[in-house]
Amino acid sequence: DAGVIQSPRHEVTEMGQEVTLRCKPISGHDYLFWYRQTMMRGLELLIYFNNNVPIDDSGMPEDRFSAKMPNASFSTLKIQPSEPRDSAVYFCASRSLGPSGNTIYFGEGSWLTVV
Amino acid sequence: SQKIEQNSEALNIQEGKTATLTCNYTNYSPAYLQWYRQDPGRGPVFLLLIRENEKEKRKERLKVTFDTTLKQSLFHITASQPADSATYLCALIKAAGNKLTFGGGTRVLVKP
């Protein structure tokens, strides 16, 4: 399996622009997580889905952030409008409820810089 | 509030020695505790999982202990190698839960 695939790997955008981050989870995994990592706050869970349904979005910082999972193989995290404080690495991760169900597999991250 | 604390100072260690990292938590009753490795520019990679009713787990040169009374986990890398240099993150998950909450991580630098 190719693992969790995220795009873009790097994005530099101007304040006020819309940013869309994309994720393809591991095939067969029924949980998908979006995390954000910064030096100050570490790894924070933003939202997670189970079978394409958002279960907990309590970590989403504000209404400028939204996430969707239209099908089992694709999810997006959108920031509109973006602000400099959104600069961070955004990780997508997936997990199954199989024998290794407590293992979460992370993508390589999307490095976002908002100037 | 719930807290997961790891030593934020980097751990510098000589090759061949044992590196020991600490993960302390408060206001939390985890069912599982996990350790991940993160290399610069990469996503975290799962290493080990230990359950609340387990005291110790080993995998090759790695050993994890879990003391629910002290609310602490220790992570040991024995016979450390320069290739072990990375940031190590502990993470907790509650029983029947799905939210994995991470500590801030500890950077390890193994010098040849």
Image (cartoon, coloured by chain):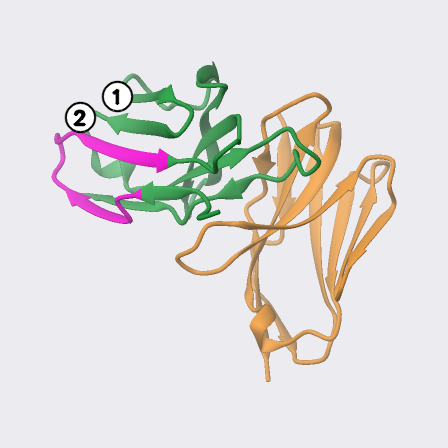
Chain colours: A green, B orange
Which residue is painted at 67% across and 38% down in the image?
A100
Residue type at mark 2: give it: Pro
Asked if residue A26 lies left or right of residue A69, the reply is right
According to the picture, the residue beneath numbered tag 2 turns out to be A81
Residue B61 part of the magenta-drawn span: no
Asked if residue A111 lies left or right of residue A60, the reply is left
Residue type at mark 1: give it: Arg
Residue A12 part of the magenta-drawn span: yes
Whether pointer 2 and pointer 1 mark residues with C-beta atoms closer than 8 Å, the reply is yes
Output the chain of dot 2.
Answer: A
Q: Name which of mark 2 and mark 1 comes first in the sequence.
A: 1
Q: Quadrant of residue A72?
A: top left
Which residue is painted at 66% across and 35% down in the image?
A102
Which residue is painted at 81% across and 44% down in the image?
B66
Q: Is residue A89 visible?
A: no
Q: Position of residue B110 (x, y in %)?
A: 60, 75
Which residue is painted at 35% across and 28% down in the image?
A75
Rate crowding at label 1 as few (under 14), some (14 to 19) or many (20 or more) other CA atoms within 10 Å: few
Rate crowding at label 2 as few (under 14), some (14 to 19) or many (20 or more) other CA atoms within 10 Å: some
Which region is colored magenta? A7-23
The kind of secondary structure element at disc 1 is loop
As drawn, A37 above or below A72? below
Q: Position of residue A7 (x, y in %)?
A: 29, 43
Q: Which mark is residue A64?
A: 1
In which quadrant of the rendered image does the N terminus of chain B lie? Answer: top right
